[in-house]
Image: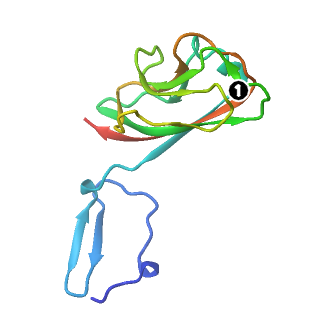
Amino acid sequence: MANRSIHQQPFASNRVAGDVFMIDRSTNTLKLDESALPPTLLTAQVVIASADVLTMFTTPIQVIPAADAGTVYFVRGGIIEFANGSANYATNTNAMLVSTTTPTAPAFLASIASRTVVPLFSQTGTASVVAGDSVSITVQTGNPTAGDSDLTVTVWYYIQAI
């Protein structure tokens, strides 16, 4: 069979277990099973009103609901974006994504002190593994003060069976 152009290939927007991807070459056809591919990268996003940002220490904000039994989240990174507002947040501005709603250790750490885009990536470059729990955003030591900007928090993650 002759090679096909990209526009001649059928398109599937998502893959499911058992899918087989065919690679046509003029001399042979190769098959790649879906299970050999890396997991699908997912996105979760939450908009946090400025009033809720001011209480994030006492009331963490859930970004991803609890993982199903037998699965874990691998959080790859994320971004915090600011909207509106004219005043920076002050004191207690180290925001983090954590593995529980009662955090003990940050997955990612970033400051929300100035109204700029804040990337959330692991210091080590590895994914943060979250087994059987939700992923939330909070601050480390106490509620922020001042500040009046809404936050949009976007998290990139994938789910893996264990």
Identify whether 105 is placed above or below 24. above
The location of residue 16, given as percent across then percent down, is 35, 55
Identify whether 8 is placed above or below 54. below
* Residue at figure coordinates x 48%, y 18% from the top left: 101
The location of residue 59, given as percent across then percent down, is 58, 14
In the rendered image, the quadrant that contains the C terminus is top left
The location of residue 93, given as percent across then percent down, is 60, 20
In the rendered image, the quadrant that contains the N terminus is bottom left
* Residue at figure coordinates x 43%, y 27% from the top left: 66
Identify whether 43 is placed above or below 108. below
- Neighbourhood count class around disc 1 (C-alpha, 10 Å): few under 14, some 14–19, many 20 upward: some
The image quarter in which residue 49 lies = top right
Give the amino acid type for the residue marked by disc 1 in the picture. Ala
Mark 1 highlights which residue?
A: 49
The image quarter in which residue 4 lies = bottom left
Q: Does residue 23 appear left or right of residue 105 in this picture?
A: left
Identify whether 74 is placed above or below 144. below
The location of residue 60, given as percent across then percent down, is 55, 18
